[in-house]
Structure formats: C-alpha cells, structure tokens
Image (cartoon, rainbow, N blue to C red):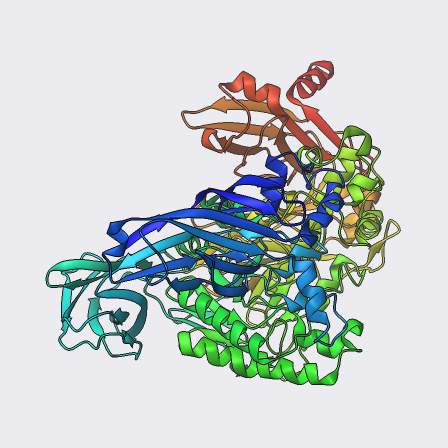
Amino acid sequence: MLKENLGGIWKMKALRSGNLYDVNVPGTLIEMLIEKKLIEDPYVVDNQKEIEEFFKEDYELTRMLQITGEHLREDEVDLVFYGVDTIADIYLNGELLSSIDDMHRTYRFSIKGLVRPGANELKLVLHSPYKYIEEAKASQTGNDDGSHLIRKAHCSFGWDFAPKLPDMGIFRDVELQSYSKSRIVDVIVKQYFEENSVTLYIDPILKIVDNIPIDIEVLFGNQQPIRTMIRMPKAGKTMTDIGENTIEIPVDRPQLWWPHGLGDQYLYDLTIKVSKAGKLYDKKSMRIGLRTMEVSTEEDQYGKEFAFVVNGVKVFARGANYVPQDAIYTRINKEKTEELIKAAHYANFNCLRVWGGGYYPDDYFYDLCDQYGIIVWQDLMFACKAYELDDHFERNIIAETKDNVRRIRHHACLGLLCGNNEIETAWENWDSFADNPRRLKADYIKIFEYLLPKAVRKMDEDTFYWPSSPSSVGSFDHPEKEQVGDTHLWDVWHGGKSFDEYTKHSPRFLSEFGVQSYPGIKTVSSFCEPSDRNVFSKAFESHQKDPKGNARIMAYMSENFLYPSKFEDLLYISQILQGMAIKTGVEHFRRIRGICMGTLYWQFNDIWPGVSWSSVDYFGRYKALHYMAKRFFEPISQSLVLEPPVEKKYGKLTHNEIAVTPYVVNDSADSTGVKCRLTMYDMDGREIAHYDESAHVLPGKVHKFGPRDFSRYIDRNGAENVYVDAAFEYTDKRLRHETYIFLPYKHLALKDSNIKVSIEEKEDLFNITLESDTFTPFVMLDLKDGDGIFSDNVFDLTAAVPQTISIKKEDIKGVDIADEETLKNQLLISSINKAGGLKQTLSFDDIQEAADAQS
C-alpha cells in the first residue's frame, strides 16, 4: 500500500471577510488565529471571551494534491480523514464527496474515478458550530444549550473545568492511500485460555480487488511465521465474517499482561502481511497483551460487587478520570501524553477512566496504557445531555462507536466500555432534566441500552459494556444505589459536607469524587498578571469555571486552617486541602476492600491552565494531591483511623476514649510481613507512649491492628500538643510513616520549625535530607524557576524521623542544575507554620540563615 500524508501547509479563508491565511494541517482555527496574532492567547487573563465571534463564521481549507502515476497505477485510491472538527463539506475537484458532522469518526472516500494526473484541488468548507446548533434547534426538542446536537467534544462548549472554545479544523492526519489486489480492513484477535497455554485466533478482514489467490502471513512474538492462502477470493468483496480467514496460533507458557502493581506488562508483537504472487500488498502491526479481563457483578452479602478481574485475580482499581489534555487538540502529542501516563504510573495508578464529555484519545494513549499497566475504563462520548434519536443521529453514533471500538479493542489495557457519563442519573435526579420531553427518556433507553451495546458487541464480543456511569444496572433502577454498580459521590464538594463524609459511604466502585484546588504560582503566573493575583480578580475568576468553587475552597479552609496572609500561601493550602480530602476517601474505601473495589478520583489532568479538581496541572506540574496519591495508592498501603470516630472541632475532643487503629491493605500479588510501632510524641519529638504489633497480610486482604487508647495521654498533655506517628516496617525493608492529629491544624500548638537540609550529588540524581526540630506538617519541595519530580513530597516531617528524598537529574526541566550549589539556590521548601494555616516558604539560604542564628 502506498500512503502519503497530506499534512503541511494548507490555505484557510474566512468566508465572511475573505481573508486568506497559510495554516498547518493538522491544525485548528485557534492555532491559526494565535500564530497570525489576530487574537491574544485565549488561555491568558480573560481573553477566551474575545475569540467567540470567530466561531460564528465559516471557513474554507484548501490544498492541491499532486497525483502521480505511482498512485494511478494502483487499483484503488482512497482519501482518509482521521479527525475533522466538526461540521464540514468535503470537495475534490469541485465535486462534493460528503458532508460530515462527527469529530469522533474516521472518514474514508474512494476517489480513483475523481482524480486526474497532476494537480487536484481538495477543499473543506468548515461550518460554524454555533450556526449548526441554531439550525438544528429548529427541529429538535429539549432544554439543553444545544451542544448535544453536534457530535463534538461537549466540553469544548465549556464545562466546570474547561473554557468555552469550540474550535474548528483538521485535528488529526489526512492520508492518501493507494493499493492494489487487497487491503487489510481490520484484524480481529481472540484469546482462549487453558492451563499454561493460550490459543490465539487471528482474523484478518480483507477488501479484495481481484480473484488472484491471497497469501496471508502472521508473525507473532518470536514464533515461526504462520502462512495460509485464500485460493478463490471474490473480487469486490470485503471478507467480514469472523472465521472466514482464521489463523490459529498456540502459545505455550505465555507471559501474561498484568495491571501496574500486580506483575509485568508483557506485550507481544503481531504482524499480518497480505501478498499475491509473492508481492507484498499490505501489512498491519500491533502489540497485544495476553490476559483475561472481566468485570464481576456477582451477588454477595453486600449487594452486587463491581470489580475488574484480570487473569482470574480481582483488582482494586486505583486511579482517576482523564479529560482532554488541551482545548486545542492538535497540541496533544505522544510526548506529552507519555509524560502524563508516566505520572499515573508514578502515583501507583492502575486505572484511568476516559470521561465521556471529551474525545477518544489517539492510538498512542492506549499503547502507553498497555505499556505502563493502566486499565482503561472507556466512556463512549456522551455526557450529561438528553439526546433526541432520529435516523441520521442513529446512523452516526453507531458508525462512531464501531470506528472507535474497532480501533482500540485489541489493547490489553481496555477494561470496560461505558455508554455515557451521568445521563441515567440525570434523568432520575437532576432538576435540569425535569422539563425535558418524556420521549427523550425513551430515546435514552434505545440509545444506551439497545443501539450502542449492540454496536459494541458487533465489534467486540469480549469487553464488558456498562450502560452509564453511575449506574446500578440500567433502566433507571436507582442509578445512585451504592450496593450495586458504580457510584459518583459528590456530597463532599458540591454538597458542601466535610471530608469525613466519605467514611460514611460504602460504594461498590467509586468512579467519581473530588475536591478542587488552585494550581501553583508558576502556573497561575502563566495566565494572571501580578496585579490580578487575587482569587476574586476578573482574570483569575475567568479561570475558575465552577461558580461556587472559590467559596467552597474557602469553606473547607475555614474548617481546617487559619486564613493565609499571602496569595501564594492560599494556593498551597488549597492543594493541601484537596490532598487531605482525597486521602481521607481513598484510605476509607481501601479499608473496606471487598465491598468497594475501585476509587477513581475526579480528575487526573487539566485541559487548560485554571482552577480544577486535577492532581496534575496543564503544564504537567504535580499538585500536592498527586504526591500524596503516590503513597495512598501504593499496592501495599497503610492508614490510621480513630475508632470509634471522634468529632474534632472548636479545639476539643467530644469522646472520652481516643483509640487510634492502624490498617494495612495489600493489593499486591505477594504476602507481606509488617511491624507496626504506634508512638505518641509532643510537638518537639519527645516520646510520650508507644505500642508495637506485628502481622502477616495476604494478597488481596486488609489487616486491622488493635486499637490503642491514647485518651489518658491526651488528657495529661492536651490534644493541641501531641500527635501520633505510626511506623510500618515491611518484609522488603520498606519503612512507611503515617501521622495522626486529634484537632484541626488551626487548633494545634504548632511551632516554627528549623528545617535542616543537606544535599548529596550522585551520578544521576541528588539526595536531599531534611530534619526538623518540631512537628512540621505538609513539607512540600519545589524549584524556584524550573520543575522537577521528587521521589516523595508533601509529607509530615517529625522531630523524631529525618526524611531523605531524591530528584533525578533527567526529571529536572526548565532550569539547568549542574551541581549541589545550583540546587541549593533553586530549592524551595514549604510547610505549615505555628499559626496552623500560614505557609512558610523557605529557600536554602533562608534555612541556612535560621540554622546559623540558632547556633
């Protein structure tokens, strides 16, 4: 097959004004407007509002195709669009090929009879999404804003984490493909497992051009090639029946693919070649993992479980929700995506949910999830809307679903296909859906419980289909019911309840929950001038898309900390609050492993630089939550809880017995021994009391240590003057610490700490050792000018236990750190000071000055 990428310089004309511009393809309208300096960057201050008028205009994209004899000598010539956003008429030499209206589809056109030798004009007329919606509204019902009427990423019309930037353009490749004799349309891979062996059934789906016998060769891993022949192909036929060309490959003692934390992610290379008369005409390559992947919904004493089962092992899903990495889709690339998936791996994720209000990621996203062991919960691209079903919409969404399921089904990482985000629960529980015509509710059932599952099964018989998230089973049967299916829990944040509310719930699988935070000062500086660095400024508020977001952050801050005096302090404290909230939830849900089998917090990443629920911001900077997730998502993790629960407020404890209970959760594949020492200290690190206990924890089990009553020590010393440190030493010599306080931080008798820092340079990293003379919560390291990923961060530094962390030289970006001295000049260390809510940020020089003064 001859392939020619048609990317490069095209012409874009604004049809209303007639202005003509050179643009890159893949490329979008916003990219062109920024490059030509026709607009200011929409990500800065409140410039996003200034661009809206451009989306109300139509545009024309053109380029000349040079069709050579090499193309024309082939039997077939196809034009393939892998991603057009969104409403477009496509013309070739003045003849309309098609009018398209779905950014989630791949479009292929046979053009052999339309092209001529030499120059050929390819033109796309891109129509305004706003005008399309206004015209569509005339024939549709419902009370939505109209974004449901266009098959375009819904969040491009604005969301509570995303700007309103409904871009236009060609955001993926365009190809000219010429071929003869046969083309591989698709490859179906089926796996059948027996003890110590797997049998693969490989089904190439071919388009046949003539009646000459076809040779098919399959190369799998290191095995010898397997060949077969189709002796009497029928010209003009696409061989689509499963089993028509099946090639069987036995694999003895296979190396299995496992999610991160349970084993290796072994991947095999698979290549299919199609030849005729000894000449290669087409080939297709992929990497596959050998594994079984199921979702168990078996009945148990708590209701019905909801758990991924990989290779027969029930997996507790640990991760978050993925949204598009940029509102300008052409800025998303493999390099940025790999950094993001590596961030998931760093934080001990084993699962990502691709949220249904965005778009279907590129192939490399799934390749990377295969590579790093991340199970993908894949929503189909429907979210929070009431859709009206007609013949065109039905054909479109079926084709869209088949396109994408066909594209991703072979990936080892694919764990589940879900019909939509929150539409079932919206029909039952949202006021905004109350005025929609009831027939749209019937259309919901047709779409998500008949048409789309049928389309999924046509393409993929093996992957579990779930109608909506959240859902109990579908058909509007109590979709928020915690005893069955998956749950979205928003009593914390949207409901305004305290973080401890999480501990009152026992969902079978929690696929959304979250708390907002502000990005760090370096990210804020990218969109706010110094004069705008106030969370209530016009520029800052334009990057806060939740109307009540700032008020909620302030409310949670008032529960836990004193009000910060500086803008940078406020940003830091908001991130600590977010981390505290999600840690509270995750630790509880992991302690009830077996009832709950998954926690995916909202959200993993950002679509632009702004305020959101993310743990990794738009520039790839780790917020406090992401560093904390690395610890609370460890396959073997530990936590502390008061039993019975104690209400902590107004500087007093409202229960006489103060018993701290340690837990260890083992989600790994191996058993572990653990020694736990529970110690109460005063703020200066003087030991008051300790308890020792040991245990052996099997894979998939939770161990609860004995509760230890500290009430008499609290009565003697005062709850504001003490904390508990739990040291967990595991069989593999890992040492982990957890701390527990008995009052909100604002009521603790914290002191200003004198942190001592020493830095040691190694060949490929720097070791940083920190010591404190007092209890110092939430120590967070950063670099002044650049960015880096620390081996650990955002931890409690106690007077009794120094901490040594490292930073690899390859993980330092944006600043040249050549030696220890350079790192000293760049290092910033933040923590909570004696006021219980104000951040103290110290440079290395500040720390040295304080140490010299003390001596």
Res. 598 image quadrant: bottom right
Q: Is residue 56 left or right of residue 805?
A: right
Residue drawn at x 40%, y 25% as measured from the top left? 763
Residue 470, image x and y in percent?
63, 72
Query: 368 or 171, which lies in front?
Result: 171
Q: How many marks?
A: 0
As displayed, is residue 42 above or below residue 413?
above
As displayed, is residue 179 above or below residue 774?
below
Residue 197, image x and y in percent?
24, 70
Position of the N terminus, as image quadrant, is bottom left
Q: Is residue 409 left or right of residue 795?
A: left
Residue drawn at x 58%, y 72% as measured from the top left? 595
Q: Is residue 611 left or right of residue 230?
A: right
Residue drawn at x 28%, y 48% as measured from the top left? 68
Residue 749, image x and y in percent?
81, 38
Position of the C terminus, as image quadrant, is top right
As displayed, is residue 8 above or below residue 384?
above
Residue drawn at x 84%, y 33% as measured from the top left? 565
Residue 852, image x and y in percent?
69, 14
Q: Is residue 70 left or right of residue 555?
A: left
Inspect this view and state whether residue 848 appears: yes
Query: 665 or 441, which lies in front?
Result: 441
Inspect this view and state whether residue 707 appears: no
Res. 702 image quadrant: bottom right
Q: Residue most toward the right?
A: 650
Query: 109 or 834, which lies in front?
Result: 109
